[in-house]
Image (cartoon, rainbow, N blue to C red):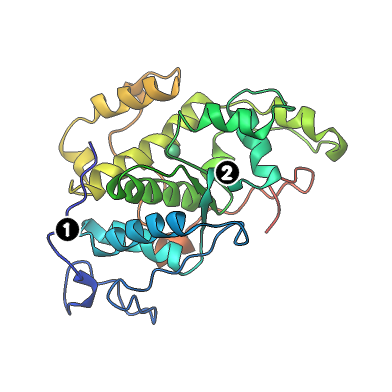
Amino acid sequence: MIRVGLAVVLCALVAGCADDPGPEPFDDMGCTNLAFNQVDGANTSVAFEAEVEAALRMLCQTSSEHGLGYESYKSIVTGRVLIDTIEDLTDLDFQTVLVFWELAADTPRDEAMAIIEQDILGYMWGNRIYIVLGDSTEVLAATLMHEVNHVLNRSDENYYLPIDGMLDPAEETQILNALSVDDGAGFREEYRAFYLEEVLAGAPLDVGQQQSMRSLKQEIANLYGFAVDVDEFPDMPGGLLIPDDDGWAARPPSLCRPDLTYFPCE
Ligand SMILES: [Zn+2]
């Protein structure tokens, strides 16, 4: 299970520390810089903000290889990604949830929430991360890191089989329903994010080069129902692993589908 070590507290403040974030002007103020941007800032709560801030503080203070935790924290507090509760899904993001869970397009929000909140800890689309409250700080910290990695890699765009040609935006409902998950692509996105949860918990970044990750891969395939042969996927995940400045600079370009509002051109 997830365990986040706190042995090296305030690592970023120590000169020459392995987790030194580098020369960027960003100041974490000793992990007290915890302000984050919400998707729907008008709709918030003290409890939500307190849970996220505790998880951000933990990510900031965690010692993990290549500053995985710290860079995930930094990606959030510098505004690269937005955080909110699953109840605050934008209308468009709610549509993508309905597609992903294969629910009817007219499913009421409260009904859909009752179903998906039991299934997930977090969800992302574009640069927006949505969380389910009520778990431990350790679980939320791991969830935020996991979802930041999805944002970095544009997992929302990679998950689905390619759609050929331009489509009529007026037919968006049908288009949403036509999106179908590519099991191999979905597995690659999830395996990378779960692999990094192991790194956040203390495993070396190249643990996949040192030992078989087969049981983790099988667990993920089972959890998500991906019909894949896990032995066909390397133990070292592909894609971008660390959400530092180099990682964000290497982020793949957006699909940019002017015909699909949920894959907007940036
Ligand atoms: Zn995921």
Residue at x-position 59% and y-position 41% = 157
Q: Position of residue 144 (x, y in %)?
A: 40, 50
**Which quadrant: the C terminus?**
bottom right
Q: Looking at the picture, tell me which residue is in the foreground, 24 or 97.
A: 97
**Residue 104 at least partly seen:** yes
Q: Position of residue 135 (x, y in %)?
A: 35, 42
Q: Is residue 211 left or right of residue 145?
A: left
Q: Position of residue 188 (x, y in %)?
A: 42, 34
Marked residue nearer the N-terminal end (2 or 1):
1
Please name the residue that numbered disc 2 is placed on: 87
Q: Amino acid at mark 1?
A: Leu
Q: Amino acid at mark 2?
A: Glu
Where does ligand 1 appear, by image quarter? top left
The reply to whether discs 2 and 1 touch (Cβ–Cβ < 8 Å) is no
**Residue 161 at least partly seen:** no
What's the CA distance linking mark 2 and mark 1? 31 Å
Q: Regarding mark 2 in the picture, which secondary structure is present there?
A: helix
Q: Looking at the picture, tell me which residue is in the foreground, 189 or 70.
A: 70
Q: Position of residue 121 (x, y in %)?
A: 42, 38
**Name of the residue lying farthest toward the left:** 7
Q: Is residue 153 left or right of residue 134?
A: right
Residue at x-position 47% and y-position 65% = 36
Q: Is residue 231 above or below residue 130?
A: above
**Which quadrant: the N terminus?**
top left
Q: Regarding mark 1 in the picture, which secondary structure is present there?
A: loop
**Name of the residue lying farthest toward the front:** 46
Residue at x-position 57% and y-position 33% = 113
2 or 1: mark nearer the eye: 2
Please name the residue that numbered disc 1 is placed on: 6
Q: Looking at the picture, tell me which residue is in the foreground, 60 or 160.
A: 60
